[in-house]
Image (cartoon, rainbow, N blue to C red):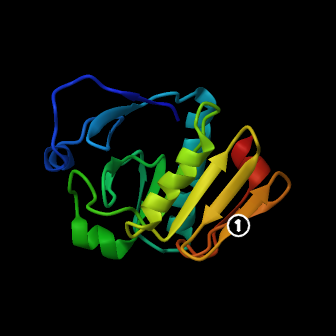
Amino acid sequence: MVAATVAQKHFTLEEFTANPLDQIEWVDGKLVEKDGVTVKHGKIQSRLGCAWANYRTLSKNGGKLYISPPCRTSRQIRRPDVAYLTPELVAQFGNIATLPQSFPLIAEIVSPTDIAEDVFLKAQEYLASSCQEVWLVFPESRLIFVITQDRMLTFRAGETATTQQILSGFSIEVDRLLA
C-alpha cells in the first residue's frame, strides 16, 4: 500500500498512541496515510478477516479479529490490514486505543505500488514486536508468504495456505482467497 506523508500538526509517539487517527500510521516520527486501497485489496482483506473470524468461532479459539487496527511496534504505530488478538491478550489489554505491541497474527495485503523490500521490512518489524506470524498476501503475483521467527513459507496459486503458530489448523486455498 502506498503511503503518503500527511501534513498536519506534530504528534509525539505517545500522543498518537493515545489518539490514533483513522487510516494513519506514525512512521519514523511522521504521520503517514495508508492509501492505495483498491476494491480488490478491500475484498481480499474482508475475505481473509471473515475466514479467520469464522475459523476462530468454529474452533472455539476465542479472541478477536480486527481490520486495520493500530498497534505499536518497537519504533512506530502501524495498522496491519487484518489482525487477530488471542483471548489472553484481549483480557490483558481490553479496549485500549492502540495495542502496545504487535498482534500475534497479522496479514498485510500488498498493492501493486508497494515496494517489496518495505513490505518484508514491515513484517520483520512486526515479528520483532511480539508478533508470531505474518501473512504477506501478493494478489497480483498470486502468492502468500507466511513468516514466523524461524521460517518463511510460500504458497502459490493451486495450493492451500495454512497458519503456522496462531489459529492452529486454519487453512485457505490461495485461489479462493485471491479470486
Front residue of this view, candidates 173 and 15 = 15
At a point 55% along the width and 48% down the height, the residue shown is: 119
Q: In this view, does 49 lie to the left or right of 160?
A: left
Quarter of the figure with residue 128: bottom left
Front residue of this view, candidates 122 and 175 = 122
Percent x, y of residue 33: 37, 31
Location of the C terminus by quadrant is top right
Percent x, y of residue 95: 22, 57
Front residue of this view, candidates 75 and 166 = 75
Q: Can residue 70 be seen here?
A: no
Q: Residues within 10 Å of mark 1 (few under 14, many from 20)?
A: few
Quarter of the figure with residue 114: top right
Q: What element carries label 1?
A: strand
Q: Is residue 154 left or right of residue 122?
A: right
Where does label 1 land, which residue? 153
Instruction: Determine the residue located farthest toward the right in the rendered image.
Output: 158
At a point 51% along the width and 54% down the height, the residue shown is: 121
At a point 57% along the width and 53% down the height, the residue shown is: 120
Check the image and report above or below for 139 versus 62.
above
Amino acid carrying mark 1 in the image: Leu
Front residue of this view, candidates 23 and 88 = 23
At a point 34% along the width and 58% down the height, the residue shown is: 73
Percent x, y of residue 166: 52, 72
Percent x, y of residue 65: 43, 57
Instruction: Determine the residue located farthest toward the top in the rendered image.
Output: 7
